[in-house]
Image (cartoon, rainbow, N blue to C red):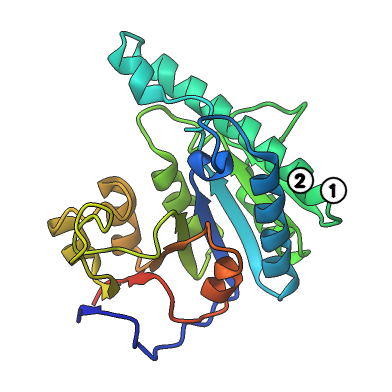
Amino acid sequence: MTTTGSDSTQQRPYKRVLLKLSGEVLMGDTPFGIDTHTIKRLAAELIEVQRSGIELAIVIGGGNIFRGMGSMAAGMDRTSADYMGMLATVMNAIALQDAIEQQGATVRVISALYIKEVAEPYIRRRAVRHLEKGRILIFGAGTGNPYFTTDTAASLRAMEIQADAVFKGTKVDGVYTADPVKDPTATRYDTLTFTEALNRRLGVMDATAMSLCRDNQMPIVVFDVTTPGQMLRAVSGENIGTLVKEG
């Protein structure tokens, strides 16, 4: 059943979550790159989530540094562009790791590309063990393969570490019937099914990521990560944002 508004009373308990962050979130109000104030705030909120008892893994994008698709449109080979985009995500992962460590928490960067000098290689059992020991995990380099987005990487890693849900942090407070910036009559969904989201092309995540979550019954929660405090509220089970699940 699909509902709109903000009066849902369903509770969502989570023990282990996968947070998907776009690279653009790190820009703050700057046109590109990493805004120092923004990354420090995000780091503080991530630590707050981890210290609340929730096991936390993160997949981060690289759009603030390198837009692979834009370069492809300008004539670059798609595979080369995608690999450059993966390296951009590793740069963001290292920056976020540093911001978290400076605030006293333990964090590990795990890369799907083999870059042993700066990140651990991805080994599923090792990643799960880090979570069990209370360490924050940051997954870089997507899936390690071209033609797959970081949305798909988030869905895949969530399945592999047996997360309870994927949380997608965006600049809006959920999924709307239309673009709320362009259409003031747009209303927010409290809940959606994967089939509804795909058929209506609501842009929750790319179709591959959505299908993967649907087929493996992995719920997705879309929420506003730019508002301080919303991250902890979302992963603690408060009914904010939009919950996408099957059935």
- Point out which mark residue 224 bears: none
- Say which amino acid is labelled 2: Ala
Give the residue at the far left of this rendering. Answer: 199
Q: Residue 27: x and y, percent?
A: 56, 39
**Residue where numbered disc 1 is placed:** 102
Mark 1–mark 2 Cα distance, whole angstroms, equals 5 Å
- Say which amino acid is labelled 1: Gln
Q: Visible in this render: residue 121?
A: no
Eyeballing the image, is 206 above or below 224? above
Query: Quick one: quadrant of the N terminus?
Result: bottom left
Q: Quadrant of residue 87?
A: top right
Residue at the (43%, 15%) spot, across then down? 80
Residue at the (50%, 37%) spot, across then down? 142
Q: Residue 46: x and y, percent?
A: 67, 60
199 vs 30, left or right, is left
Element carrying mark 1? loop
91 vs 218, left or right, is right
Q: Visible in this render: residue 30?
A: yes
**Residue where numbered disc 2 is placed:** 99
Q: Residue 150: x and y, percent?
A: 44, 41
Element carrying mark 2? helix
Residue at the (40%, 23%) spot, across then down? 68
Q: How many marks?
A: 2
Q: Residue 19: x and y, percent?
A: 53, 57
Eyeballing the image, is 140 above or below 171? above
**Do callouts 1 and 2 mark residues in contact (Cβ within 8 Å)?**
yes
Q: Quadrant of residue 114?
A: top right
Q: Residues within 10 Å of mark 1 (few under 14, many from 20)?
A: few
